[in-house]
């Protein structure tokens, strides 16, 4: 990710803040931490200085998307997500994979159409490993978030406070 990707990311942030849905304070707080770390990675060139920096970002991002999934389901149904752990993990991983694949398409299209780094359809072989690694890390974060959610539900802890 280069500094040139800032414009598409600013568009994404703008779109997120005009969404009328209220969001829980812990989710919003984690999102702000992710955004600060992401922009530190861009402006401080941490993504290029430390090749491992992208991995934890995807793990935390995958966990955030999983927690968003739980939040949206709880908000829609009015209660904690039920079912076996396998059922919870499969639904959550499905949601996170969907978001992760859409994000990877967003990055690729930005690289091709906005930054003109590659011709359309070019450089896929070099990107394939990075994309698979990113999706794996997204799923790893989703797994940890699902495990945390399930343990919290078993202990009958209340959901994190939400802003209305």
Image (spheres, rainbow, N blue to C red):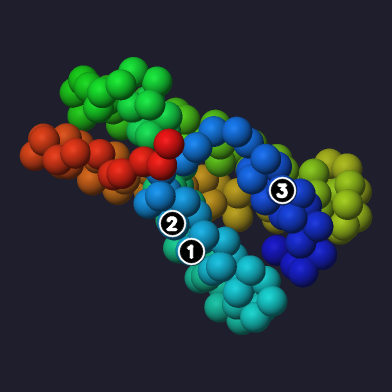
The residue where tag 1 is placed is 33
The spot of residue 134 in percent (x, y) is 54, 52
Q: CA distance from mark 2 to mark 1?
A: 5 Å
User: Residue 100 is drawn in which quadrant?
Assistant: top right
Q: Which mark is residue 136?
A: none
Left or right: 53, with 156 as reference point: right
* Quadrant into which the N terminus falls: bottom right
Q: Residues within 10 Å of mark 2 (few under 14, many from 20)?
A: some
User: Residue 90 is drawn in which quadrant?
Assistant: top left
Do the numbered discs 2 and 3 sit on residues whose CB atoms are within 8 Å? no
Which comes sooner in the sequence, label 1 or label 3?
A: 3
Residue sitting nearer the eye, 119 or 90? 90
Assign a secondary structure to mark 2. helix
Is 35 drawn above or below residue 127 in the view shown?
Answer: below
Assign a secondary structure to mark 3. helix
- Is residue 123 something one can see in this rendering? no
The residue where tag 3 is placed is 14
User: Residue 44 is drawn in which quadrant?
Assistant: bottom right
Q: Report the number of discs.
A: 3
Assign a secondary structure to mark 1. helix
Left or right: 77, with 16 as reference point: left
* Quadrant into which the C terminus falls: top left
Do the numbered discs 2 and 1 sit on residues whose CB atoms are within 8 Å? yes
Which comes sooner in the sequence, label 2 or label 3?
A: 3
Is 132 drawn above or below residue 96 in the view shown?
Answer: below
Left or right: 64, with 89 as reference point: right
The spot of residue 107 in percent (x, y) is 72, 49
The spot of residue 18 in percent (x, y) is 67, 40
The residue where tag 2 is placed is 30
Residue sitting nearer the eye, 128 or 76? 76
């Amino acid at each position: 990710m280069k500094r040139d990707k800032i414009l598409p990311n600013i568009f994404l942030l703008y779109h997120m803040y005009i969404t009328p849905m209220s969001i829980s304070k812990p989710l919003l707080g984690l999102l702000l931490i992710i955004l600060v770390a992401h922009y530190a990675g861009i402006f401080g060139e941490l993504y290029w200085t430390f090749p491992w920096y992208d991995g934890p970002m995807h793990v935390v991002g995958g966990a955030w998307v999983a927690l968003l999934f739980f939040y949206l389901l709880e908000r829609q149904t009015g209660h904690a997500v039920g079912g076996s752990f396998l059922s919870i993990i499969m639904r959550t991983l499905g949601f996170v994979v969907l978001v992760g694949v859409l994000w990877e398409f967003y990055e690729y299209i930005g690289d091709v159409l906005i930054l003109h780094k590659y011709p359309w359809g070019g450089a896929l072989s070099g990107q394939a490993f990075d994309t698979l690694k990113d999706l794996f890390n997204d799923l790893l974060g989703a797994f940890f978030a699902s495990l945390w959610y399930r343990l919290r539900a078993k202990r009958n802890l209340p959901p994190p406070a939400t802003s209305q």
